[in-house]
Image (cartoon, grey):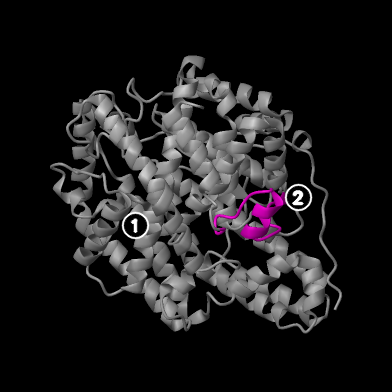
Amino acid sequence: MNYATNSKRIIPLSQSQTLHLADISAPTPTIESLAADRATIESLLDQGDRPAALAAWDRQRRAYATWSQLAFLRFQQDTEDQHAVAMRALADELGPVAIGHDSAIKRRLLADPDRAGLEAAMGAHIVRLWQADITTFNDRIAARLEEENRLAAAYTALTSSARLEIDGHIVNLSGLQPFSEHLDRATRYRAAHVASAFYEENGAALDDIFDQMVRVRTAMARELGYPSFTELGYQRMRRTDYDAADVARYRDQILAQVVPLLARLLEARRADQGWDILYVWDEPLMDPLGNPAPRGDHDQLVEAGQIMFDRMDPGMGAFFRRMNEGGFLDLKTRPTKAPGGFCETFPTVGMPVIFANFNGTHQDIGVFTHEMGHALQFFASRNLPWIDMLSPTIDACEIHSMALEMLTYPHIGLLLGQDMAQRFQRMHLETCLHLLVGCALGDHFQHEIYANPDASPAERHAIYRALEQRYMPWRNYGDLAYAAAGTTWQQVLHFYEVPFYYIDYALACCCAMQFWVKAKSDPQAALADYLALCARGGSASFSDLVASAGLVSPFSSGALDAVVQQAAAALEGNSI
């Protein structure tokens, strides 16, 4: 069969038309309109016009994705806005319906004897993704998918409801961070108690939400013929080139190499500070002079960011200016705004939006550069021919974000002041090591949870605490009894909303640190390789994208050797 391609030229960053976030809209779908869209595609396939069917299907998927992602964004921007709540609920309801229609079309295309023609048009990688996708859905699990979405929204609403009082201030969970990193130890202690009290007060509800999620996910997996949700979870993450055994071996590398280095760094900090015991509320303070914070307020940080990206690359600077002028940066904390940060994309217009909660700490810089990496990748690959190519699988997505955090090191003084630049780099590098360990712990926990889906909440807490003592043997909760009982996993939204996502940060971190090592000797070559990787979008699998950028796969033996050696030299030998 003839599968004509839908190729388009990739437009240089500086030549794209500027638009505004407020101008983006998409028609609100209904169950009937989604059925009609599918009927159109099926009719074209019945007529044998496969190129027209593929093109129409791509347009419909882009329109639905833009609407769905707008609905998600508006809810995150104001979780108490009733219209936004209603649109999020509608998106949760329609999501399984849309997946069902897409799955049916994918099955029909994959059943065509002319697989070679399909692969020639779409690329073999996209066809493999579709093969994975069709194993994750049938109509019998649609109601359970909707329930899973409802539970995720309930978690977001609950954590967004936090109104925490500390030192005369009322803050949300994001707003608590400056107190958690305060130079004054007593302030950090109070912040830890305030956070722990919130999670303890809501612990039963959080356990109940998660318990329902585990049961719903396990039921879906069994309905689809999987032995547990783990296998279904990997398919939903579209992991076509590695499995749980590969991930377990990577976790073992982190245990063997990163945990001992972090233990040495934390013990040195304890000794330098003169503390008898390093408590959990001491861990966020990584700099003895106080964690470097951004220079100035939101507006000053954005202005400095513009200068930074202009210096790094003219195209990056033009893109950031376009985002700022178009209102695609939502960075300020608001009372009813959901916590956290993310980059959302709108495939009908080829523009992303960055959502964050600036709180005056170094995390503002981290989330700012991290989400800019996601945004830059999407924009650089926005003209690839098919929606499935616009973004890679999530594991590879995180390479773009985490690598940009490190590639900005030479310019980071613009955001902090030059006197703070080296201190920030040290802190950020140590944060990367903490991330590797924390994500390995979280991933191991999830594998245990879905291998034991009937465990009680108390048993889940015990599982987490046992793993925490293995991955973080230094952790001491002092008198925070609730946190010490193995409950701090409740603070990780990924466990609730995107199971098995967490390890992707650790996989990407291995790759991002390789960009950092290369940039130390050849910054221009490292940036060129990075931008080329962004432009490839989702045209290849994680392993193939990693190889195309000249990086060592995290699944290779000794993948962490060079980066851990460099990190140890920088942090223990002051060679940044």
Task: Determine whether 284 is above or below 481 in the image.
Answer: above
The answer to whether residue 308 is left or right of residue 188 is: right
- Per the image, the residue denoted by label 1 is 154
Q: Position of residue 307 (x, y in %)?
A: 62, 21
The answer to whether residue 194 is left or right of residue 16 is: left
Task: Determine whether 576 is above or below 386 in the image.
Answer: above
438 or 346, nearer to the observer: 438
Q: Position of residue 501 (x, y in %)?
A: 47, 57
Which contiguous range is marked in magenta?
536-556
Tell me which corner region of the image, top left, top right, bottom left or bottom right, holds residue 128: bottom right
Cα–Cα span, label 1 and label 2: 36 Å
229 or 410, nearer to the observer: 410
Residue at image coords 68%, 43%: 379
Tell me which corner region of the image, top left, top right, bottom left or bottom right, holds residue 210: bottom left
Q: Earlier in the sequence, mark 1 or mark 2?
A: 1
Q: Position of residue 255 (x, y in %)?
A: 39, 53
Q: Report the mark closest to the observer, 1 or 2.
A: 2
**Label 1 amino acid?**
Ala
- Per the image, the residue denoted by label 2 is 383
Question: Pointer 1 and pointer 2: residues touching (CB < 8 Å)?
Answer: no
- Residue 127's disc is none
The answer to whether residue 557 is left or right of residue 464 is: right
Q: Position of residue 544 (x, y in %)?
A: 68, 58
Mark 2, other Cα within 10 Å: few <14 / some 14–19 / many ≥20: many
**Label 2 amino acid?**
Asn
The prevailing secondary structure element of the residues shown in magenta is loop
Tell me which corner region of the image, top left, top right, bottom left or bottom right, holds residue 351: top right
Residue 315 lies within the magenta run? no
Mark 1, other Cα within 10 Å: few <14 / some 14–19 / many ≥20: some
